[in-house]
Amino acid sequence: MTVPGQVMRADAARNVAAVLAAATEVFRELGADAPLDEIPRRAGVGRATMHRRFPTREHLFAAILRSQVDTLTEAAEARMSAGDPWEALLEWIGAYEEIGARYRGMSAHLSTALLEDTSPVGKLCAPMKAAFDVLFRRAQELARVRRDISSADVLAILSALPRDPDTGRARPAHLTVVLDGLRSGSPR
């Protein structure tokens, strides 16, 4: 792994870019549990080259998801002062679902990682989780969202929902049950 502040050689940078492009392709085609050996084969690099930079599947996920997580963080921040906190929450959850559907099986991996702040994906998601927490707490205050559940719980539940095998999206009926449950019988 590159030490912070250390410049990566041009050939190493090309290899990293090739591995990430191949991993993105493999995970989109075969799902998040795809065989890792397929990635260096498609990237045209050796297994050791991939594992030197990305020692685990989760390190690959973190690298691939970085821009999407940044997008979700910005989306939460942009909605923090929205006139309707419930609609702002629903819009953000829609964006979260859209990103989660890009890689079949990724939501299950995210569900675990979101609860582990020390994992590579957990560390990556920390700013997103913090921004969503502010958005969620605002909805709790102003939009009758339940107070007996945390924003981290909501993210874990959303990530654990059953997925349509063709689209990777949460089944609409299941998502509706979760969203309705956030407001139904709102304990104060």
Image: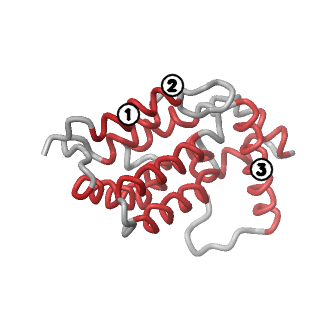
Nearest the eye: 155 or 185: 185
Q: Which label sits on residue 21?
A: 3
Q: Earlier in the sequence, mark 1 or mark 3?
A: 3
Residue visible at 73% across and 43% down in the picture:
23
Q: Closer to the observer: label 1 or label 2?
A: 1
Per the image, label 3 sits on a secondary structure element best described as: helix
Q: State which quadrant residue 131 falls in.
A: bottom left
Residue 114 as seen in the image, left or right of residue 9? left
Q: Residue at x 72, y 38 (%)?
A: 28
The one nearer the camera, 169 or 59, is 169
The amino acid beneath tag 1 is: Val
Rendering quarter of residue 135: bottom left
Q: CA distance from mark 2 to mark 3?
A: 27 Å
Residue at 80% x, 68% y: name it.
10
Element class at badge 2: loop
Residue furthest to the left in view is 188
Q: Is residue 92 left or right of residue 164?
A: left
Foreground mark, 2 or 3, reads 2
- Compare marks 1 and 2 and give the one earlier in the sequence: 2
In the rendered image, residue 22, in percent from the top left (x then y), is placed at: 78, 45
In this rendering, which labeled residue sits more in front, label 1 or label 3?
Answer: 1
Residue type beneath disc 2: Pro
Q: Are marks 1 and 2 in contact (CB under 8 Å)?
A: no
Q: Which mark is residue 162?
A: 2
User: Callout 3, which amino acid?
Assistant: Ala
User: Which element is circle 1 on?
Assistant: helix
Residue at figure coordinates x 60%, y 44% from the top left? 55
The residue nearer to you, when weighing 124 against 83, is: 83
The crowding category of the residue bearing disc 2, from other C-alpha atoms within 10 Å (few below 14, some 14 to 19, many at least 20), is some
Comparing 183 with 118, the one in front is 183
Q: CA distance from mark 1 to mark 3?
A: 34 Å
Query: Which residue matches tag 1?
Result: 178
